[in-house]
Amino acid sequence: MWNRHPSRRQLLQQIACGIGHTAFLGLAAVEASAEQARSVLAPKLPHLPPRAKSVIFLFMHGGVSHVDSFDPKPKLAEWNGRPSPLPKPQFEFADTGNLLQSPWKFRPYGESGLEVSELFPEIGKCADDICVIRSMQNGNQVSHGPAALALHTGDGVFTRPSMGAWLLYGLGSENQNLPGFVTLSPSSYHGGSQNYGSAFLPAAYQGTRIGDGNTPFREAVFSDLGVSDQSELQRQQLDLLQRLNRQYQRTRNDDSRLEARIQAYELTFRMQMEAPLVTDFSQESRTTRSLYGIDDDPTDEFGRLCLVARRLSEAGVRFVHVNHSYPRNYWDAHSGLKKNHTTNAKKVDKPVAGLLRDLQQRGLWDDTLVVWGTEFGRTPAAQGTDGRDHHPHAFTMWMAGGGIQGGMTYGTTDEFGYYVTSNQVTMHDLHATILHQLGLDHTKLTYRYAGRDFRLTDVSGRVVKDILI
Amino acid sequence: MPTDCQSHVTRQLTFFLQRVAPVLACVLTVSASSWRANANDDHFERRVRPLLAENCWGCHGKTEHEGGLRLDTVTGLRSGGNSGRAVVAGQPEKSRLILAVRQTTELKMPPDGKLTRTQISDLEKWIADGAVWPIDSHQPSDDSNDEEVKLLEPDVTRLAESLQLWLKADAFRCNDEQAVFVWPDLSGHGRDLTATAGIRAEGTGTPPQFIARSHVGGHPAVRFVEGNGLAGSPDHVLDIHGDAAATIFIVCQLEPSTTTSRLENLLMIGNPALHADPGGPRAIYLEIDRSTDTPTLDLAGGWSHDASLGPGSAELLYSQPRVLTVTKTPGPMTAGTSFFFDGNSAQEILKRPLEGTDTVPDVQHRNDFGIAIGKPAGWAGSIHGDIAEVIVYNRVLTNDERRGVEAHLLQKFGLLTARIFEAATRRFTGEERSHWSFQAIRDPVPPVVAGADLSANPIDHFVVAKLEANELHPAPPADRRTLIRRVTYDLIGLPPTPDEVHVFLADKSGNDAALRRLVDRLLSSSHYGERWGRHWLDAVRYADTTANDGNFVMRYAYRYRNYVVDAFNDDKPYDEFLMEQVAGDLMLHNDPRVTAERIIATGFLMIGPKALAETDKEQVKMDIVDEQLDVIGRALMGLTVACARCHDHKFDPIPTVDYYSLAGIFRSTEMFSDLERNASKWMEYIVPSGLNGETIEVMAPKDSVPRHLRVHLRGSRFRLGQIAPRRFLQVLAGSGHQTISGNSSGRLELARWIASANHPLTARVMVNRIWQGHFGTGLVSTSDDFGTRSEPPSHPDLLDWLATRFIESGWSVKEMHRLILNSQTWQMSTRVDPEIQERAVAIDPDRRLLWRAPRRRLDAEQLRDSLLVIAAQLDRRIGGSELTRKLYEASQVLDEKRGIASASTINSRWDGFDSRRRSLYLPVVRNGLPDVLAIFDAADANAVTAKRNETTVPSQTAFLLNNPFALQQAEAFARHVSSLTDDETARIGLAYEISLCRQPTGDELTAASRFLAEYRDSLRQRNVEANDAELSAWSRYCQMLFCLNEFLYVE
């Protein structure tokens, strides 16, 4: 159903009325000149041979504790209840006490023997397919807002475009009937729409939202799309509209925006047909649905998000931002660590593993870069009696598919998980690597604004070559 | 005998004696320091420094700082790296450096080897003994420029050992102008100076006076006049004997006196030889020699044995406060003496060496008094002037030590040295200074263009001259229908009503007069301020919430918004408008209403995005300063000043020291009322409103402690460079200029400078912005950047001519509107004949030469407001605060007492956005704009928006076709026209007039009728009831009208 790699001719055929693909939507300048008439969302050539075509970014909002999930620290058990011998960071969000051991056990998985905690048994079974980066570092961002913004946009203070927007800017979209960057159930907190925004890049590159942190995903829809059974009626209206628009345009044919808007109306009409299909699972088998944990409790919600993500990605959406986010879901265990992470992990473990398996089974593995991330980790020392506080100085994220080596860990932290001891990966490094896998050189993908060239990685960032296949 | 003052002093003396050591520590170091030195200097030099150099500096040194850590400088050692402090003085077990070299944890240093056991224990010992880093005059302890004054921390213990005398006027309290009988010595040696006139035969002079606010920077000082003198006891003399060394610091301001004394004593140590004993130079004696007309300052050993600064040198101490330093090495007088004024060597100032003798003084103490200031006894005179502080050591301090004490004294007494200004002064090349926008605004003579039908408006002459030079011509004038739609949208952001259109078309006067009348009507409408206020709010990143994590509601931001609307409606002179926003709280007025208004204006500084939950509060303050400088730079002056935060601006002549000069002004201004850990509160306070004796609460800053900042190298406040004295941009205000006094933040001075008619940028930037508002693009297309990377203006002479007119008119924005709107250039049509168009597009595709008028899409507010107008739904009330209050109530209150409520729960579906008021009044929730605005490219309130994007995206067409708001207005529009007439043709005509300002053509009528009939039929086939079908068909038809390009674009 989804034409994943359309040729130019196929693209033209996909467009109703055979109207020229070039005079199209998304012009970002005031009244464009002829050469600017190409769509800003048309596919563009990458800088390098790409390994992957799209990204699925699984955002665990609130700060997943690394020492309780993917970075085992047996010394914490030994030192449980004792003050940390290592100096605490200069900047902390709140006061912490003595070291706190992990309530969960770790065990090795697969041939690689990669250790994962009891929180994620299903993801653990995929150990040979994922690359766990234990040396993530998010500067001194000890609060959620700046940390989440730094993760998504590269900067916690200034307004910058999100990684999805940069990606779309760099590569365009392969499916002109769907938005090129979609965000599922994002929170309105901690930067809100800025985390999937386009900032100073043209608005066409911002993420299109389905649902939000407050709404069960079952009820979420693409907003502003008409109901398909009204489409005949709407067509009558559109026909009159377009006729008059054409009349108006006839004596103003140096203005390509007019044609662009005519096309945009047609696209809206077409999207009304196609977009609802994205969330319609009736075509998916029972096996697939249960792989993701759909219709089961408590995995149904996140399972749906993951399945929609696969469908979108398969259909050519460049960047799918999948949120397990506040207020309905939150990993921010300042207290009650055990209950918080147990509850949250149960919701996501099976769906995420299901997504990985599904991508493999459908031959989408190499083309899809999956990133599982969070805005910071949590302190090895306790907050209160049973919680952990924010900790950006060292934490864990993992990546899979899209040319990333599986079954490996990258980077290390000290014996308690306080600081990175080797192979630090900053937010900029992460972004450089993601762009690289999609064929973009992070130093070359620039945009002129306020007098200078900007890029996602600002003035730093290195591609983490050691984790690439 | 003891006066109140003296007994008080005695008590104080005891008090201070009990606290000498810590006081000493506080004064002689800039901050309390745990670094202490002893024989470990040797240990460090022999064992630790070479170890570090060999094993660590490769990666943690001058060129590379792995992990952000430097181990080759004191600063680096103390700052630590990315992971925190490397060394905790006195505690090796807590020092990461030790953990790393022990290699017992995952952190192993060096990465490719291990230090020997001995080396490790050398490091441990070094840290256990205080991790001393000796200050070495031969090797600078960090790599900053030797020429800069460094605020070093002199080694306390070493200096303490050689401290001989320490007098501080601010250490004891006296009533102003009271006699000082005792000046206590704080060195610990008890060498108090006293006035003993009348107490013993040949006693010292009469007691000097204590002055609370002296000439020395307004600080307390002891004032000496004719006959005054203080001297120490002969039983407690300074430990300076024989062929001695000394370093003397005196902070003073002296005056020329009119006494007959030939010699005035500033400070005497020892016994200067008598005239009768010329061979005995037995003193080190600072004097002013008045035997000639040009008094000299010299250091005398005795009669005719001195090292002199030469004729007139005493003037260096007159009429301005000074930190005077004198050093004397053992050996010959002249060769061994050096003078410094505010840290600058006398040689450099006077450009001549000392003159004098080679005598070697042999200091011997008198038996009648010890050290003396002023008239010690019968024969010498007193200096005249204020002395605030005296410090004497019995050795020559190293350069670093001396500079450290000088810098401390300069800072303490607020005497910035010429050296600091000099170091911060940048001299620009001719090329840098020659950039077009830095030149004074000219008043060019408009070119003469022949042509009978060319208007008298000089704008047209500038434009047409350029067109003709490129073999182009202006487009014909637009018709009246086009003009009224264009000008109404331009000036008030709303569509003209059919009646207004009729009146304008029927106006029988000539086009000029009719348009002028129309323009006047629009400019006097209160809706004008709502439209042009919104342009301004774009530029100054206005919002009602703080963004980022908390997204707290700023309850009083709306006052600033209303101030802006009023300012435009009242045509407040733009220079006043600017000054009030930057420094209104400092511009108090008799009329409390004006004062309140001016304070509200400073909301301009407060409305930016803020990371209030950030725990690093100093960082938050600097980030806020940064975004303030960004707005002031880009919105007011067209300069990207904020680019110089971490380094010199890469393109424009704005050095990083200039950034910090400006930053100091704002860092001297307080934005917060508290700095609570996870949710700091911005400043809100109560002021009289000036109405009925009531008060209101406002959001505004307050001036705080004035301070200069240091350059933050790479933007990091842990790596501080030179002092950046508060002042303006040097390339514009002059290299090394000084116009801000020590006691004010400088905001008012800055405001005046920016708003000055002499400022080359301010007027140009604003007229360009006004031009952009009427043409879609400014004469300078980058309206927030007039720097060296910007596109130069398309019509530089026109820009300057307009800027000059703007200033001449009294900075009147409305007059500028009239001037522009009156021009044929603005009144052109958007359409020209196809062949002309083809040619013109080939020559000037971006229409920078203005060969036709631009076609512009309605912006977000115009669109939403228009839909409400044509649906007869718009609530036209001006001003008010109801929606902000509603927002606050709908937000999640986190702290009622401090007024902190988070708007993170507010999304685009909040019912407050259903208000039918003009879009300007919808609260601006950062990262949570209502869809209708966000989708149509409303400004992103997180940053300065100089010019909005204009996009064409399917989310817009989806909105217009399907969004509930669009559907509601469509239905209301349909009902409205239905209520006016039953006749179908008339209704269609009305719908066209209301939305498109014209009547439909015959074809359009036919098409409309056909549509309505067919649509009704389709609905009836679906069993929709007749009345509903009727309404539905009309709603779809009316909706179609506002989906048209003809509606969405203004010609």
Image (tube, rainbow, N blue to C red):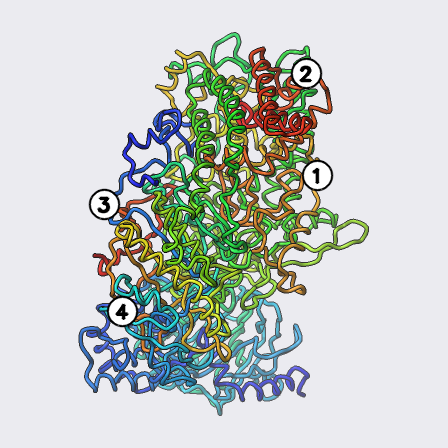
Q: Is residue B467 visible?
A: yes
Element marked by disc 1: loop
Q: Are marks 2 and 4 in contact (CB under 8 Å)?
A: no
Mark 4 and mark 3: span between their CA atoms?
28 Å
Q: Are marks 3 and 1 in contact (CB under 8 Å)?
A: no
Quarter of the image where one finds residue A463: bottom left
Circle number at residue B878: 1
In front of the other: B567 or B919: B919
Amino acid type of disc 3?
Leu
* Disc 1: CA contacts within 10 A as few (<14), some (14-19) or many (>=20): some
Where residue B859 appears, as percent x and y from the top left, is: 54, 33
* Disc 3: CA contacts within 10 A as few (<14), some (14-19) or many (>=20): few
Quadrant of the drawing holding the N terminus of chain B: bottom right
Where residue B500 appears, as percent x and y from the top left, is: 68, 21
Where residue A324 appears, as percent x and y from the top left, is: 45, 59
Task: Check disc 3 and report the residue beneath it.
Answer: A48
Please tell me which of labels 4 and 3 falls first in the chain.
3
Q: Is residue A56 above or below residue A33?
A: below
Mark 1 and mark 2: span between their CA atoms?
33 Å
Q: Are marks 4 and 1 in contact (CB under 8 Å)?
A: no
Mark 3 and mark 2: span between their CA atoms?
62 Å
Amino acid type of disc 2?
Ala
**Residue at 65% over, 38% down:** B918
In front of the other: A106 or A422: A106
Where residue B400 appears, as percent x and y from the top left, is: 35, 71
Q: Is residue A450 visible?
A: no
Element marked by disc 4: strand
Task: Check disc 4 and report the residue beneath it.
Answer: A422
Quarter of the image where one finds residue A179: top left
- Judge left or right: residue B1037 versus residue A301: right
Q: Chain of mark 4?
A: A
